[in-house]
Image (cartoon, coloured by chain):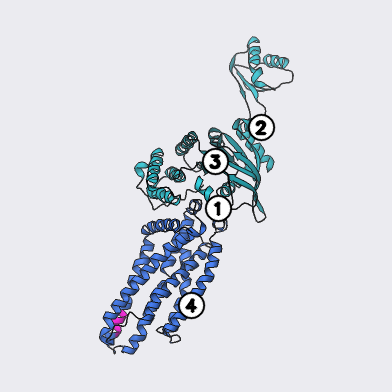
Chain colours: A cyan, B blue
Amino acid sequence: MIETENLTKKFGDLTAVDSVSFRVDDGEVFGFLGPNGAGKTTTVRMLCCLISRSGGSARIGGYEVGDGEDSLKIRNMIGFVPDNVGLYEPLSAFRNLDVYGRLYGVPEAKRKENIQRFLKLLDLWEKRDFAAGTFSKGMKQKLAIARSLIHDPQVLFMDEPTANLDPEAAKTVRDFILELKKEKRTIFLNTHNLDEAQRICDRIAILNTKLMASGTPGELERMVGKRKTVIELESVTDSLVATIQKMLPSATISVDGVRLSIDIPDADMRTPDIVQALVQAGGRVRFAGVVGSTLEDTYLKLVRRDQ
Amino acid sequence: MRLSQAWIVTSKDFSLFKKRRNIIYSIMVIPIMVTCLLSIVVWYIQHKASGVASPDELAVLLPAFMFLYMILSGIIPTTIASYSIVGEKVEKSMEPLLATPTTDGEILFGKWLAAFVPGVASIVGFGSVFMVTADVLSYGTLGYYFFPNWSSATVLFLMVPIAVILSVEWNVLISSRVSDVRIAQQTGSLVLLPFAGIYLSGELNLVNLGDINNLLLITAVMAFACLLMLYAVQATFQREAILTRWK
């Protein structure tokens, strides 16, 4: 659905986005992670045909981004939720959506149907005649999302949709994105909320002017660190540690209070053997599991390395 | 250019204007005050104790008063255009609007129309009211109805619309440089200086504002300035420039 190849944007001497290539498939939720100033918003603006590209190419739904005729077609098939909601605050929620429905050329009957549908889905229908300016931040964000969907776009670009929202409003927005995912819409999500990206996205790309990495959340987690076995015992004795060391001579074992961390290749396969050996040696196991590096580890390592 | 698309932008702006007291004030209250004041002056100079105005004096004064409506062209559209463009910029609603399948030209034309229509309607409407009032008040002195005449028609139906266009164009250029509605209005109001200069020239008898040839010459100069400014406006009102270079 979305393809970029060496997409580049320069503002004078400053390179905001440097040769970025990625592909987003139909119905996929694609997370774009990166620190402030990484070029996330610039990339979205290029893809939404709001600003030109300095190099490379991008296509959405087969149309060329940046081509005059195609740009209008692309803008017609995408929805866009900017980082600032940009509502017409003196106008009612209904009128805000109606204006955009008309701009997208949605016929009146369909427009009214869509307004009702999305306002009801987002719990705003009862407030449809209230001025948008009287809404809370969360309600405004929901209204901005409804606005971006008024023409039933196949592709939705969302720029930091949960930034500055309280946890409850952020959850409502995240749940709604998951609802949209069920409808097989392609969603391009700009965020610097790692937890959100991990929970919502099928695939994630990490950007810091250049594309640092991309893959599923699981692939990214495994990218920078090995998985290790963690075992919590009632008490850790030298003999228990020696038992494990004898069993796995190449393993690096560290002790943190009653917790043993055993760094070995193939931790998932060896953990049951380790537990059995500890029990046979008289150890009382409270917890055993395999933990790996997190998305945060990967993100921080990639971003810091780049800096 | 799809006029229907531009009209959606215009009608949206009209809905917003209805909620803004400043805009209602500039469209309604200022022209009402000017019309009342000028009518009172026309009545007063015919009834003052130290001697009434002669028909010749009145015939010079009335076209000059009519020309004051030109000056309103620098005030009313300035308020509307600054709210329409800088207001949208301040409230960050320009970006989602630019993301719709609407061209830069359609948005610009829609915004231009939103400032032009109420501006011209207000000035022409209240200018017409003044003509009727002045006719009623001056008939006793002149013995004939002074308005309408070719010079008043030229001012109201030719010069005022062109002055409003010039004013809106100037305000679009200003809007790209400022991020505050009040500063936009104050700077935008500078457009009335040349109109005020022409009015003063008339008052100082340097230019006869009752002479239709003079009015047509001024109109031609203004129309030329409009065309020149249109190129600058088109270069300024570009999607990318609005998002990345406008202050």
Image vertical order of residue A126 relative to residue B63, above or below: above
Q: Is residue B41 magenta?
A: yes
Residue B105 horizontal/vertical position (percent): 50, 60
Residue shown at 40%/72% (left/top)? B72
Q: Quadrant of residue A227?
A: top right
The secondary structure type at the circle numbered 4 is: helix
| Residue A172 seen in this snapshot | yes
Q: Amino acid at mark 4?
A: Ala
Q: Nearer the viewer, mark 3 or mark 2?
A: 3
Q: Chain of mark 2?
A: A
Q: How far apart are the alpha carbons under marks 2 and 4?
A: 71 Å
Q: How far apart are the alpha carbons under marks 2 and 1?
A: 41 Å
Badge 3 is on which residue?
A189
Badge 1 is on which residue?
A69
- Disc 3 + disc 4, Cβ < 8 Å: no
Front-lying residue, B238 or A64: A64
How packed mark 3 is, by other alpha carbons closer than 10 Å (few <14, some 14-19, many 20 or more), is many
Q: How far apart are the alpha carbons under marks 3 and 4?
A: 54 Å
How packed mark 4 is, by other alpha carbons closer than 10 Å (few <14, some 14-19, many 20 or more), is some
Residue A223: which numbered mark, if any?
2
Q: Chain of mark 3?
A: A
Badge 4 is on which residue?
B220
As drawn, the residue found furthest toward the left would be B140
Residue stretch in magenta: B40-45
Q: Nearer the viewer, mark 4 or mark 1?
A: 1
The secondary structure type at the circle numbered 2 is: helix
Q: Amino acid at mark 3?
A: Leu
Q: Amino acid at mark 1?
A: Glu
